[in-house]
Image: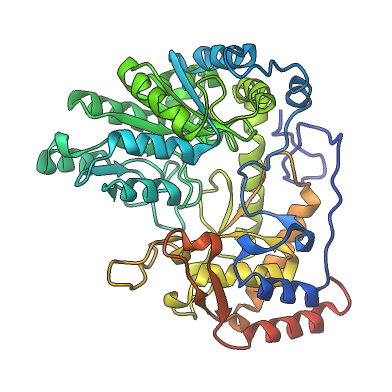
Amino acid sequence: MANIKFFLGEEIPLEMHKVRMVQRLDLVPIERRLAAIEEAGNNTFLLYNKDIYLDMLTDSGVNAMSDQQTASMLVVDDSYAGSATFTRLNDKINEIFGKKYFLPVHQGRACENLLSQYFVKKGTYVPMNYHFTTTKAHIMINGGEVLELLMPEAVKPTSSEPFKGNLNLDELQELIATAGAEKIAFIRIEAGTNLIGGQPVALDNFIEAGKIANKHKIPFIIDASLLADNLHFIKTREEKYKNHSIREITEILSKTADVIYFSARKLGHVRGGGIITNDETIYKNLLEMLPLYEGFSTYGGMSVREMEAMTIGLDETMDEEMINQGPIFIKFMVEELVKLGVPVITPPGGLGAHLNAMEFLSHIPQEQYRAGALGSALYIASGVRGMERGTISEEREADGSDHLAAIELLRLALPRRVFTLSQIKYTIDRIAWLYENRKLIGGLEFYEEPKVLRFFFGKLRPTSDWQQKLVAKFKADFGDSL
């Protein structure tokens, strides 16, 4: 129903919801935006919400809940142990995923911590379709090595390949043959790759990876945090499954894996997460660890109110008219930027629109953090906060040098049911202006740099006075307009 044709010929996505609660936003003057990004050390993570107009940093924990989710939070059972709220959530997960055991945790990276401690040993490998920052950190801390087995199209910014997130199965089999199955802690597929543009994975790729894992008795783990978008893409891009329901696709996908884990900040639209399995041995071992790091087995660090809302949210994830909202608005944004000649990752993926900073700021040395500089510049020009997904998001090499990212992206996440079409059009307009004036943008350099996950708390400064020049050009072009 969201694909409605308009009599006047416009091609725009249609919201399948109405707004019933609002939050005030402010668009501060450009002078304040310049001061704010300086105070934040040119790290958009360190900006304060009072200085942000549109927050496109992430879709994690900031998606709009439905009225049914909000209502469910009033009927909780707040027992510490044996809560009926947990039973309702556990039953819903069993129904959707067809797996017997569920361990609740406070968010997705808690799953990564537990799974890495259990599976990863020093000197083992974890092959995957692409790493996520915290996943890689947990594996490395436990002595493992992440191996990214990418398809050739994965890091090509412009492509028509519908499933750029696929695991390279040929390389996986070569790894098993050369390293030995015993050296592989587990195989991981991210159901929708976060760091290379929200690109999806084909259902047949999950199926074949699962067969390989099963043949060699290697645990197969799926990160389902971005599953909602990936389900939409399987149904709309994979011809073989176009007549399958979302529930049927989910059931097939779930059967391929030994373990599924997820951040409910993305999947289910609440603050929490969980680990799902049919393997009793894995379940019992993780269960012993759960109280040490998260909480008792029937709440695992989550609020019971969030657990009630998660039950509804997961059920709503089985509704195509709900899960298509993110992808169709992202598609609109990406296609409008393409029309304007702005370099952006194609085909449109999930999670958000991704600006190709490698090309956008090709005049800046990659060592001066193109994606980070673009994030600073866009905030100054618009008040829109995006997230750097490039070299700043990588860890340094052992010798202290930068590990230059294969792809430099500025992610503009579109949290579900949050922004209006006019706000998206405003963002497109400011990006277009910035692209016209891209030569004014310069690089960044660290002056405070944490040793681990530096993109969260690191601080950088411009390598020249380019930010002042950008402000001057903005005022010349827009006058008193914010």
Coordinates of residue 418 in the picture (x, y in percent): 74, 43
Residue 409 shows up from this direction = no
Q: Compared with residue 360, is residue 427 higher up or lower down, i.e. above or below?
A: above
Which quarter of the figure is the C terminus placed in? Answer: bottom right
Quarter of the image for the N terminus: give it: top right
Q: Quadrant of residue 429?
A: bottom right
Residue shown at the point (60%, 43%) measured from the top left: 60
**Spot occupied by residue 373 in the image (x, y as percentages of width and height):** 57, 73
Give how far across and how far down residue 66 sits, in percent.
Answer: 75, 28
**Viewer-side residue, 215 vs 182:** 182
Q: In which image quadrant can residue 354 be found?
A: bottom right
What residue do we see at 61% from left, 72% from top?
41
Q: Is residue 345 left or right of residue 116?
A: right
The answer to which of 260 and 298 lies nearer the viewer is 298
Measuring 58% from the left and 37% from the top, which residue is drawn there? 266
Residue 102 placement, left or right of 310: left
- Judge whether 400 appears above or below 262 on screen: below
Q: What x and y, as percent, mark residue 247?
A: 53, 18
> Number of marks in the image?
0
Picture residue at 63% right of the left edge, 11% below the top: 84
